[in-house]
Image (cartoon, rainbow, N blue to C red):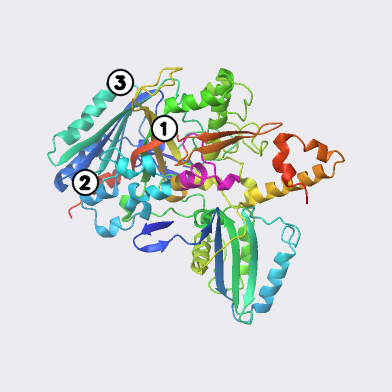
């Protein structure tokens, strides 16, 4: 049995799905599949087959890091015949689903569920299967196994498929290296890339273990269904790359200024080098060095002269920037994040929209939908109350119906970007639950 | 803003602009009125909480008051908080010195089991919350914005005290400041 003990916490890694806990390989290719269960018996057969394919966190990595992760929506668990008492024991946000939370999440206007890509946000979405691999051939093989698992079952429909990838550079459609700054988790045996931050309590990510408050996260019943599971959020986010580049070009004095404005908005240079450590110019060596590119805090820069207080990276992970407020504990608002790209990269220097759909599949894994994903989205990305700028939202990913502004602290006079349109549109998403392997067996063997 | 929690709860606390009201009502334990008054006096004398200190542990509340009423058998705690306070409930109990200060006061009211059971404390506090029937504010802005505005206003007065202030404010870019300079 594979377990790692840290600070007295022993995680049952043989029971936890690897995809819920670990970073993906980089670079990689992947595919997201959404399935609908029309026949309960076929649904349980599907779960039985997927159980054989899902990777436990404790298994040795394959050379190509190929993994299959399985998760269910509320409607999916219902379609499998999970008893109502058990369905009712899930947290309300999961039971409602992402589309019902749209107004809270800022998914309004162009991002509202009525404009979402079908079938996202509908009660037809039951099962999510994610296949990732660092090798395209291995991905095809694993995806074929996943396809066979559902294609031989007439009561199962494949209703959505999304290919995704991460480039070798780690850069997403906006051109910035992503995926830096992940928290480490007690009991996983994976070291932290930020020596300044203690690993998170396991219960922040996996159900059934104490979290940062010292309590067990709310867990659905029965125990076998909830323990070692985690909530997973995925969102398909269309990125308006041409509009973003045009905006920067219009506001910047020259190309170097464009790079600087982009870095100020993100909080990092395109290479991934953090402004906190490289405030003046990009430092690609720093950006590429995982031992250094996450090794910083904001305490020495309270006014944001190096890294603006409203920049994306500082909003999404304020580190120690809010420690003096006395009202927020940033460790309650961490998460496992996986941004993966979809669609063709817009060639460098193109500022005309080519009409292609491109963007990010954002994935969250954590034990608390409300105080992790929803808190960060609503309080830190969509709002600016916490930094004393209620009218500003995240310059890159913030939801805004009206053009916004972004303040860059600099001497002698602050710079303020005005008339900033939204650069990200929500195409849809779901709240899912990635159960443990023993819960997958329990689901397959339901006899309701 | 409301949430749809199976017919439960509208979001607790009314908001005006970025600020929400937060009011708690407790019953004082029998014969503890006097000791509670003493505990509140101790709080009042804590650095940061003394009148004029303007240095409460929570930097995102505008003001706070404890009111004993009904012959010291009831206690109210009433404040205004930047942001929707229910989003921050768990943070209150794991960050900063706030919970230790409150612990000394809550010991005198009914239903309080005490630390270290944070979940029980949270349930106890939420159980005492009453959403206002009406809430109005006379200025917009968060505490962080107000503090910035005060620093800017002080700086402006220093500028006006300079012998060449009138001349310096003649530049067209400074017209909005000149408009505020006459009184």
Q: x, y (%) of residue A304?
A: 64, 36
Task: Give residue A339's mark.
Answer: 1
Depth check: give the residue in front, A94 or A399: A399
The C terminus of chain A lies in quadrant: bottom left
Secondary structure at numbered mark 3: helix
User: What residue is disc 3 on?
Assistant: A136
Distance from disc 2 to disc 3, alpha carbons, whole Å, reads: 30 Å
Secondary structure at numbered mark 2: helix
The magenta segment is: A375-397
Q: x, y (%) of residue A307?
A: 61, 33
Depth check: give the residue in front, B40 or A26: B40
User: Which numbered disc, 2 or 3, marks the residue closer to the eye?
Assistant: 3
Q: Residues within 10 Å of mark 2 (few under 14, many from 20)?
A: many
Distance from disc 3 to disc 1, alpha carbons, whole Å, reads: 19 Å
Task: Give residue B182's mark.
Answer: none
In the rendered image, residues at marks 2 and 3 fall on the same chain = yes
Mark closer to the chain start, 2 or 1: 1
Q: Residue furthest left?
A: A154
Q: Disc 3: which chain?
A: A
In the image, is B176 to the left or to the right of A437? right
User: What residue is disc 2 on?
Assistant: A444
Q: Does A215 appear in magenta?
A: no
């Amino acid at each position: 049995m594979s377990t790692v003990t840290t600070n007295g916490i022993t995680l049952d890694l043989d029971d936890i799905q690897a995809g819920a806990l670990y970073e993906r390989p980089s670079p990689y290719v992947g595919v997201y599949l959404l399935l609908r269960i029309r026949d309960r018996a076929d649904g349980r057969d599907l779960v039985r087959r997927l159980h054989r394919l899902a990777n436990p966190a404790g298994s040795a990595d394959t050379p190509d890091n190929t993994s299959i992760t399985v998760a269910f929506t509320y409607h999916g668990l219902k379609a499998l015949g999970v008893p109502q008492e058990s369905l009712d024991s899930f947290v309300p946000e999961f039971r409602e689903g992402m589309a019902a939370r749209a107004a809270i999440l800022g998914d309004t206007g162009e991002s509202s569920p009525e404009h979402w890509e079908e079938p996202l946000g509908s009660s037809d979405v039951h099962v999510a299967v994610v296949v990732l691999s660092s090798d395209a051939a291995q991905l095809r093989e694993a995806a074929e196994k996943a396809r066979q698992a559902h294609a031989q079952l007439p009561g199962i429909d494949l209703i959505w498929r999304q290919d995704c990838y991460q480039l070798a550079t780690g850069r997403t459609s906006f051109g910035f290296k992503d995926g830096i700054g992940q928290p480490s988790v007690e009991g996983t045996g994976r070291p932290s890339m930020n020596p300044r931050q203690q690993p998170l309590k396991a219960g922040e990510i996996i159900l059934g273990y104490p979290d940062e408050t010292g309590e067990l996260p709310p867990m659905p019943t029965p125990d076998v269904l909830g323990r070692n599971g985690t909530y997973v959020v995925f969102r398909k986010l269309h990125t308006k790359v041409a509009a973003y580049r045009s905006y920067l070009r219009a506001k910047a004095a020259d190309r170097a200024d464009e790079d600087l404005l982009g870095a100020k908005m993100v909080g990092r240079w395109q290479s991934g080098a953090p402004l906190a450590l490289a405030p003046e110019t990009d430092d690609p060596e720093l950006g590429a060095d995982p031992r250094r590119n996450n090794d910083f805090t904001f305490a020495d820069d309270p006014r944001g002269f190096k890294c603006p207080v409203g920049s994306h990276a500082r909003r999404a992970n304020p580190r120690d920037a809010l420690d003096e407020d006395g009202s927020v504990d940033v460790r309650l608002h961490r998460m496992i994040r996986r941004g993966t790209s979809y669609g063709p990269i817009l060639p460098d220097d193109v500022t005309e929209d080519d009409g292609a759909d491109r963007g990010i599949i954002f994935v969250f894994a954590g034990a608390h939908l409300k105080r992790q994903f929803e808190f960060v989205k609503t309080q830190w990305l969509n709002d600016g109350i916490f930094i004393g700028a209620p009218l500003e939202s995240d310059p890159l990913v913030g939801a805004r119906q009206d053009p916004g502004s972004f303040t860059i602290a600099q001497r002698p006079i602050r710079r303020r970007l005005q008339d900033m349109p939204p650069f990200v549109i929500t195409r849809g998403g779901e709240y899912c639950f990635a159960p443990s392997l023993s819960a997958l067996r329990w689901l397959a063997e339901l006899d309701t | 803003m409301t949430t749809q929690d199976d017919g439960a709860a509208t979001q607790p606390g009314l908001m005006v602009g970025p600020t929400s009201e937060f009011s708690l009502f407790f019953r004082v334990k029998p014969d503890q009125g006097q000791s509670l008054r003493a505990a509140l006096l101790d709080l009042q004398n804590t650095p940061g909480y003394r009148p004029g200190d303007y240095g409460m542990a929570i930097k995102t509340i505008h003001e706070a008051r404890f009111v004993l009423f009904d012959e010291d058998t009831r206690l109210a705690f009433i404040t205004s908080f930047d942001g929707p306070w229910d989003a921050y409930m768990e943070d209150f109990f794991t960050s900063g010195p706030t919970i230790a200060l409150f612990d000394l006061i809550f010991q005198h009211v009914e239903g309080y089991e005490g630390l270290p059971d944070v979940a029980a404390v949270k349930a106890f506090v939420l159980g005492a919350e009453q959403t206002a029937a009406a809430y109005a504010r006379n200025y917009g802005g968060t505490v962080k914005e107000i503090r910035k505005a005060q620093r800017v206003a002080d700086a402006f007065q220093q500028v006006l005290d300079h012998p060449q202030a009138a001349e310096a404010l003649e530049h067209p870019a400074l017209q909005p400041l000149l408009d505020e300079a006459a009184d």
